[in-house]
Image (cartoon, coloured by chain):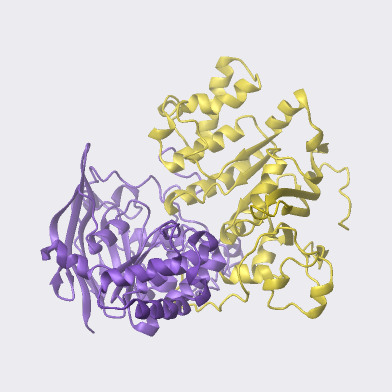
């Protein structure tokens, strides 16, 4: 398959009064045409910074320390401002976080999108642009007659759809979606997720979907990348990563949240809190919170390497057991420990994380 | 509503009967007519002592309003709220102080619910000061005990810090300590975990479960997240546009939802397994506002199963379909 985007050892720091914040550190991955990559991690782990560096929309205090971003073979950071402006939105578009507030309240929604098209494609006539917006509205499921309406006349879900339509306006080959459904109710979220998937298949577009929600990532991604404190810890085909998480952090994220399906399982608590990126821990950045950590983890930084076809990992002591699951609460007693959702037999395992007895992270949380 | 009247038994700690709250809204600048938004409409439910009842629904369904009515941050338009057999709306003067000790609320956003200019000690001790409980030394001891209990240990490391020095999870722990320091018997928790990061959220959820075990507190747990409600609650009440449409045992609601709205809500929850193809939730249109609603089922316009009889019938009341599973639907 054709590679559309490739990050090579991308390292980006922010300058602050207190020092350099190491927001992205040595991130490498590639994305094929038509593929969708889900980036999952907690707030402050560098997901949005990656999105911004792909758009070259970084604030002035950001500095590219090393690494390259290759888009269609072109190094984005070797381009002039004028060249990147031509690429932005036309080739790489973004659906921003809190997109619902990113519409201009004094212009009708339709006109805002028409303006976006005309700005980026001056050769298009206004008539053509209007026609295109009409079909975009159809694509995202807003009736075309709502084009003349203003943002305040739209519901939250519709605004989100309009923003998606705007991101699609110039038919980009890559779309970056930064938590586009976080502020929405589940039923609306479900509809938007389905629409995004639908559109992506129809126009064979690549996507990077950023979210803190593992479940949402599971639904929209072909490839999943797990970020922690500015580093990519694991990346691989969604099926592999979700069935056999290798990095303890991936595992903890997956079982830190209750599920609506299957039997109730005990929740994995991750003790402590994410590190300060002004001075991240030595060795593996996750080691102070990791149950699997060895002496080596505190000293030596794990190397990013491929462990199976397309499955990458940075970890000294990965989880090797198949289908490790937290113990199932009530059901375990009867011996019928089965998780209906995945159909895999659950093992009673010593993996209930540190402080997982419900005591939380005493004080450090 | 035709539900059996709560008996005098000490079993029921919160008894809400036919509770309604209407807010006047302007229907356009020039119309001059006042319309009523039925935020909470004829809601009846009970919470037993030591129980956690989850109140689940989408934004705008009236779940937060219900919580605020119970702690008397808002006054009901009609209906009664009995907490330990005392009518909440009739409490006045000195009794109010007592009520505030008995019933507490934990708010959603720990970044806004704590006074930035107070130290952690002042924040947690304030309810004790206001109520004149204990001497200074006793208060100090109680605050320390409470901080220990919510996992902020050692307390001495936190007592004289300010909220901005703490992380979101720690702030929420402070907010919980403040609510529990007066030893309330009933707590309304309004989405206490929704603003927190995944790894922190689990700790708070486990803390809530643990405090209930240890202190025997009853909760009304308000959340939009059915998975969280399933994990923490004994029973779940599902709200839609001001009405409770289904109420029952948590596992029962999640595994055997009967109301078409509950079914849609459950099928819309994303699943952390790429191998599972969720069927699309069976629901039409979008959520509206209950402004002067027609006297029929609120869910009628979006219901995939509605029949012509639903169009003309009254708004259905909650009926017991067995095992204390209540559903408000004409089709059952």
Q: Is residue A334 left or right of residue A210?
A: right
Q: Where residue A310 sits: x, y (%)?
A: 26, 76
For the question of whether residue A232 can be seen, the reply is no
Q: Residue furthest front?
A: B30
Q: Is residue B231 left or right of residue A25?
A: right
Question: Count of labels shown?
Answer: 0
Q: Where residue A108 sits: x, y (%)?
A: 45, 64
Image quadrant where residue A80 sits: bottom left
Q: Nearer the viewer, residue A242 or A77?
A: A77
Q: Where residue B320 sits: x, y (%)?
A: 82, 64
Q: Is residue A214 left or right of residue A235?
A: right
For the question of whether residue A300 can be seen, the reply is yes
Q: Colour of chain A?
A: purple
Q: Which of the image's four quarters has the N terminus of chain B?
A: bottom right
Image quadrant where residue B14 sits: top right
Q: Is residue B102 left or right of residue A169?
A: right
Chain in yellow, by letter, is B
Q: Is residue A179 above or below residue B161?
A: below
Q: Where residue B284 sits: x, y (%)?
A: 63, 75
Q: Is residue A264 above or below residue A90?
A: above
Q: Is residue A108 above or below residue B192?
A: below
Residue found 69% across the figure and 59% down from its top: B239
Residue found 46% across the figure and 63% down from its top: A181
Q: Nearer the viewer, residue A314 or A99?
A: A99
Q: Which of the image's four quarters has the C terminus of chain B?
A: bottom right
């Amino acid at each position: 398959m054709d590679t559309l985007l490739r990050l090579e050892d991308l390292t980006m720091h922010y300058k602050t009064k207190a020092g350099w914040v190491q927001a992205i550190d040595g991130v490498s991955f590639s994305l094929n045409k038509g593929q969708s990559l889900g980036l999952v991690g907690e707030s402050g782990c560098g997901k949005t910074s990656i999105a911004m560096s792909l758009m070259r929309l970084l604030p002035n205090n950001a500095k590219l320390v090393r690494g390259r971003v290759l888009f269609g073979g072109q190094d984005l950071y070797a381009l002039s401002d004028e060249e990147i402006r031509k690429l932005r939105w036309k080739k790489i578009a973004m659906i921003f976080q809190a997109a619902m507030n990113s519409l201009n309240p004094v212009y009708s929604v339709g006109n805002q999108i028409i303006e976006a098209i005309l700005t980026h494609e001056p050769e298009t006539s206004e008539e053509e642009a209007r026609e295109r917006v009409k079909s975009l509205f159809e694509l995202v499921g807003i009736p075309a007659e709502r084009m003349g309406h203003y943002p305040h006349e739209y519901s939250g879900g519709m605004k989100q759809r309009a923003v998606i339509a705007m991101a699609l306006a110039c038919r980009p080959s890559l779309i970056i979606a930064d938590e586009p459904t976080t502020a929405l109710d589940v039923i609306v979220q479900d509809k938007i997720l389905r629409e995004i998937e639908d559109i992506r298949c129809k126009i064979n577009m690549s996507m990077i979907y950023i979210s803190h929600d593992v479940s949402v990532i599971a639904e929209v991604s072909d490839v999943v990348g797990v970020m922690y404190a500015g580093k990519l810890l694991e990346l691989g085909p969604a099926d592999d990563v979700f069935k056999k998480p290798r990095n303890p952090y991936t595992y903890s994220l997956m079982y830190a949240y209750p599920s609506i399906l299957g039997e109730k399982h005990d929740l994995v608590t991750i003790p402590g809190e994410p590190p300060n990126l002004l001075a991240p821990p030595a060795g593996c950045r996750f080691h102070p919170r990791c149950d699997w950590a060895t002496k080596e983890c505190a000293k030596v930084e794990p190397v990013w390497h491929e462990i199976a076809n397309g499955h990458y990992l940075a970890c000294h002591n990965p989880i090797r057991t198949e289908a490790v699951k937290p113990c199932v609460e009530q059901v375990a007693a009867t011996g019928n420990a089965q998780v209906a959702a995945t159909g895999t037999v659950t093992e009673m395992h010593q993996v209930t994380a540190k402080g997982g007895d419900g005591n939380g992270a005493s004080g450090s949380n | 509503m035709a539900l059996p009247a709560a008996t005098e038994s000490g079993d029921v700690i919160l008894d809400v009967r036919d509770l309604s709250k209407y807010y006047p809204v302007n229907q356009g600048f020039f119309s001059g007519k006042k319309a009523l938004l039925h935020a909470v409409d004829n809601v009846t439910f009970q919470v037993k002592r030591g129980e956690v009842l989850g109140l689940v629904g989408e934004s705008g369904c009236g779940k937060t309003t219900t919580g605020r009515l119970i702690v008397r941050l808002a006054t009901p338009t009609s209906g009664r709220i009995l907490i330990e057999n005392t009518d909440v709306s009739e409490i006045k003067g000195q009794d109010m102080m007592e009520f505030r000790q008995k019933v507490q609320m934990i708010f959603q956003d720990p970044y806004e619910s704590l006074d930035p200019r107070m130290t952690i000690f002042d924040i947690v001790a304030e309810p004790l000061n206001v109520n004149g409980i204990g001497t200074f030394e006793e208060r100090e001891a109680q605050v320390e005990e409470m901080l220990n209990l919510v996992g902020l240990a050692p307390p001495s490391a936190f007592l004289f810090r300010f909220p901005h020095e703490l992380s979101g999870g720690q702030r929420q722990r402070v907010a919980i300590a403040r609510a529990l320091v007066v030893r309330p018997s009933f707590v309304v928790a309004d989405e206490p975990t929704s603003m927190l990061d995944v790894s922190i959220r689990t700790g708070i959820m486990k803390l809530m479960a643990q405090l209930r075990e240890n202190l025997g507190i009853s909760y009304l747990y308000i959340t939009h997240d059915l998975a969280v409600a399933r994990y923490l609650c004994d029973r779940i009440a599902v709200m839609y546009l001001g009405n409770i449409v289904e109420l029952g045992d948590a596992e029962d609601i999640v595994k055997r939802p009967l109301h078409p709205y509950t079914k849609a809500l459950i099928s819309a929850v994303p699943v952390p397994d790429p191998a599972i193809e969720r069927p699309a939730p069976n629901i039409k249109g979008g959520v509206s506002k209950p402004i002067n609603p027609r006297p029929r089922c609120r869910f009628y316009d979006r219901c995939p199963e509605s029949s012509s009889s639903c169009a003309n019938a009254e708004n259905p009341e909650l009926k017991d379909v067995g095992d204390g599973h209540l559903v408000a639907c004409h089709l059952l």
